[in-house]
């Protein structure tokens, strides 16, 4: 089991009426993500994120999406220390855009820029970056955040296309990472999927060529190389020197 960022439950659309006097004072703490064991990423992040984290896929038979594994327990993020500092070299965009996010309308036809009002950087004292100017128009800061979140959503759509291709080619299989706790007790990290190397090798030259030309093959290799980071995370956190999955091709 895993736990993702829960602030989506508190998402409130940005409104010039409600948030006209709101300002955002930047914080350097990532404590809000300290209990997030996985975080979604998009395809543009694969090359960089693969250097720090294990990239896997989660979801249903109909739809999957990529995430980075940040902890070994549902409420654990080993990349955020007690002071709220992010310990990895790369901070996923999903985390960096907080406290802003997009939320879909009930019919799925529209996206709204939302904020987590519970974030402690918000204030009505004018400290930091204002969301709106004196006339109630969007500030340059808010427009910048709108562009950032819009661009992220655009890449998220490309990510969905990539994941759909993996499913159509039937390349994804369930994976389980097994390891031992310091007590000697066996434990495992499951509920994810990874690309099966053997299935990848069995693809026709035509399909492999299509993956290469579209850039998908580079993403696939980044994912496969990233799996070793799960073992490194286990080793660092639990003091073990190795870990293994339930399929030999995915020894991590």
Image: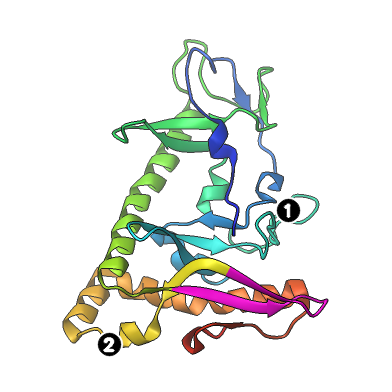
Give how far across and how far down residue 203 sits, in percent: 24, 83
Q: Residue 25 magenta-drawn?
A: no
Q: Nearer the viewer, mark 2 or mark 1?
A: 2
Q: Residue 183 magenta-drawn?
A: yes
Magenta segment's dominant SS is: strand
Give how far across and how far down residue 49 sits, in percent: 52, 65
Left or right of residue 195: residue 76: right
Which residue occupies 57% across, 41% down? 98
Residue topped by disc 2: 202
Whether 222 is drawn above or below 158: the answer is below
Looking at this rendering, what residue extends furthest in the front direction? 185
Q: Nearer the viewer, residue 238 or 79?
A: 238
Which residue occupies 47% across, 19% down? 15
Residues in magenta, as a range: 174-189
Picture quarter with the N terminus? bottom right
Q: Nearer the viewer, residue 146 or 54?
A: 54
Kind of element beneath mark 1: loop
Give how far across and how far down residue 218 sits, in percent: 36, 74
Quarter holding residue 231: bottom right
Give how far across and how far down residue 168 sits, in percent: 25, 68
Picture quarter with the C terminus? bottom right
Q: Which mark is residue 85?
A: 1
């Amino acid at each position: 089991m895993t736990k993702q960022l829960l602030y989506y439950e508190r998402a409130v659309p940005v409104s010039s009426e409600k948030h006209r006097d709101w300002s955002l004072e930047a914080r350097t703490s990532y404590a809000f993500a300290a209990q997030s064991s996985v975080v979604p990423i998009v395809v543009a992040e694969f090359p960089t994120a693969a250097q720090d984290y294990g990239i896997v896929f989660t979801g249903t038979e109909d739809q999957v999406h990529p995430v980075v594994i940040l902890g070994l327990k549902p409420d654990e993020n080993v990349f955020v220390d007690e002071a709220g500092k992010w310990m990895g070299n790369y901070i996923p965009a999903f985390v960096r855009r907080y406290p802003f996010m997009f939320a879909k309308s009930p019919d799925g036809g529209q996206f709204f820029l939302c904020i987590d009002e519970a974030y402690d950087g918000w204030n009505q004292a004018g400290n930091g970056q204002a969301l709106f100017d004196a006339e109630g128009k969007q500030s340059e800061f808010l427009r910048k955040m709108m562009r950032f979140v819009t661009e992220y959503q655009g890449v998220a759509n490309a990510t969905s296309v990539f994941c759909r291709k993996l499913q159509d080619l039937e390349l994804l299989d369930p994976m389980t990472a097994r390891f031992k706790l310091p007590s000697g007790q066996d434990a495992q990290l499951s509920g994810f999927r990874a690309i099966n190397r053997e299935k990848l090798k069995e693809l026709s030259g035509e399909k492999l060529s299509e993956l290469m030309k579209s850039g998908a093959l580079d993403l696939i290799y980044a994912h496969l190389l990233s799996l070793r980071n799960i073992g490194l995370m286990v080793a660092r956190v639990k003091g073990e020197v190795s870990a293994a999955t339930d399929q030999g091709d995915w020894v991590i």
